[in-house]
Amino acid sequence: MTEPETARAAALLGQAPRVVVFTGAGMSAESGVPTFRDALTGLWQRYDPQALATPEAFHADPELVYGWYEWRRQTVRLAEPHAGHRAVAAIEKRVPQAVLVTQNVDDLHERAGSVAPLHLHGSLFAPRCSRCSHPVPVADDTTLEPTEGRRIPPPRCPRCAAPVRPGVVWFGEALPPEALEAAVEAAANCDLLLTVGTSGLVYPAAEIPQVAARRGATVIQINPLPTPLDEVSRVNLRGPAAQLLPALVR
Ligand code: BJW
């Protein structure tokens, strides 16, 4: 990453009337929330996604899956947004037609001041009934330390008594249609899309920057490593989100 590239990206961002910011797990890495696919620290290096992040896994072993997501929810609860999250909120303030689309299931964008991000893969903070989809708020036990590997029986739905499940999108499940439609629409009509901290491997979310590029928008990528989105990005800023995002809105 060089200074001139950052300055070029900042200038492009400063001129664009319609901006989409598209974020993935790398956005929250410097807050201490693990990514999925990073070589040393990614969750999928230590855990089998088929055994934890599918509807079949929840059906087979609800206590294991619910406990794993409670551990992750507590980890996020104790994490704090960083300067990069605050820079994204500053972009939204500065650009009236900015749309934030996130694949992240944490709430760090909201806690940094972003209003109503489109959560393509749901949220750790929106549990719902696994049968009737009724939202079931689960109280945060603020005395609870994040404990890895604890099995926790899921609470029961007050309406139909089925087990409550995490409000995230598992492999093989459809994305929330309103969020996905709004994200595609925003990408198709933006002047500039800024993609931050995603491997660009998981579909259909990974289509979002590609839709923007196909429609002629400028794509800027922030990521320490190359990704399949390099090809559609006019500027590739190789570095961490907490450092590079503030440099774009200075
Ligand atoms: C930094 C950094 C720093 C590090 N600063 N950067 C087409 C082709 C092939 C397969 C498919 C396809 N279409 C669909 C599929 C199947 C599947 C899929 O995509 N599989 C691929 C993995 C092969 N997709 C699905 O199953 C989706 N559903 C679906 O298609 O449904 C169809 C359907 C329609 C109608 C009815 C029914 C069904 C659902 C996908 C759900 C994904 N869920 C997860 C888990 C969420 C819950 C949880 O949290 O446990 O979502 S998987 C995981 O991956 C999570 C993420 O949101 C998602 C994307 O990951 P992300 O954010 O990119 O993170 P990483 O770790 O991959 O990358 C981090 C990046 O950050 C790296 O590049 C680092 O370098 C970088 N980084 N530090 C900036 N400081």
Image (cartoon, rainbow, N blue to C red):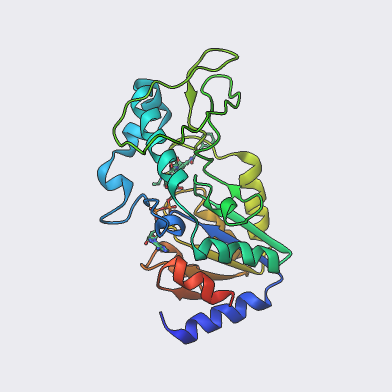
Residue 114, position as x, y percentages in the image: 62, 56
| Residue drawn at the location 58% of the way across and 59% of the way down | 211
Does 66 appear above or below 250?
A: above
Residue that extends furthest to the bottom in the rendered view of this protein: 4
Residue that extends furthest to the right in the rendered view of this protein: 96
| Residue drawn at the location 51% of the way across and 65% of the way down | 84
Residue 142, position as x, y percentages in the image: 46, 36
Residue 208, position as x, y percentages in the image: 56, 56
| Residue drawn at the location 46% of the way across and 59% of the way down | 27
Quadrant location of the C terminus in the rendered image: bottom right
Q: Is residue 48 visible?
A: yes
Does 42 appear above or below 161?
A: below
Q: What number of labels is visible?
A: 0
Q: In this orientation, which residue lies closer to the viewer: 115 or 199? A: 115
Residue 230, position as x, y percentages in the image: 44, 69
Q: In this orientation, which residue lies closer to the viewer: 59 or 148? A: 148
Residue that extends furthest to the front in the rendered view of this protein: 143
| Residue drawn at the location 49% of the way across and 46% of the way down | 106
Quadrant location of the N terminus in the rendered image: bottom left
Q: Is residue 53 visible?
A: no
